[in-house]
Image: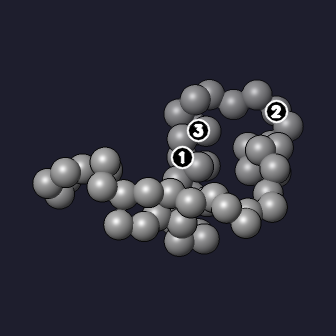
């Protein structure tokens, strides 16, 4: 990982209209799957800023 890691980056969800149920589904899922889905949304909408 680059020097400084993720502490110098921000994720801005402002303006997103998706609900948690739309992102994760209505069924219970493990935390590892939640993390993967969150990163999919971040990458899909280019929400990560340096």
Question: In the rendered structure, which disc, 1 or 2, sits on the residue that comes first in sequence?
Answer: 2
Residue 11 x, y percent position in the rendering: 50, 57
Point out which mark residue 33 bears.
3
For label 1, the crowd category at 10 Å Cα-Cα, with few meaning under 14, some 14 to 19 and many 20 or more, is few
Label 2 belongs to which residue? Answer: 27
Residue at left 77%, top 44%? 20
Q: Is residue 50 above or below residue 7?
A: below
| Secondary structure type for disc 2 | loop
Disc 1 to disc 3: CB gap under 8 Å: yes
Q: Is residue 43 above or below residue 25?
A: below
Residue at left 56%, top 60%? 12
| Secondary structure type for disc 3 | helix
Residue 19 x, y percent position in the rendering: 81, 50
- Quadrant in the picture for the C terminus: bottom left
Residue 15 x, y percent position in the rendering: 73, 66
Tell me, what colour scheme is on the image?
Answer: one colour
45 on left or right of 28: left
Label 1 belongs to which residue? Answer: 36
Residue at left 44%, top 57%? 10
18 on left or right of 50: right
Number of marks present in the image shown: 3
For label 3, the crowd category at 10 Å Cα-Cα, with few meaning under 14, some 14 to 19 and many 20 or more, is few
Point out which mark residue 13 bears.
none
Whole-number angstrom distance, CA of label 1 to CA of label 2: 16 Å
1 on left or right of 50: left
Whole-number angstrom distance, CA of label 2 to CA of label 3: 12 Å
Whole-number angstrom distance, CA of label 1 to CA of label 3: 5 Å
For label 2, the crowd category at 10 Å Cα-Cα, with few meaning under 14, some 14 to 19 and many 20 or more, is few
Residue at left 30%, top 55%? 8
């Amino acid at each position: 990982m680059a020097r400084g890691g993720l502490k110098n980056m921000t994720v801005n969800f402002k303006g997103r209209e998706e609900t948690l149920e739309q992102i994760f589904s209505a069924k219970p899922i493990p935390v590892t799957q939640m993390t993967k889905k969150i990163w999919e949304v971040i990458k899909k909408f280019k929400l990560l800023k340096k």
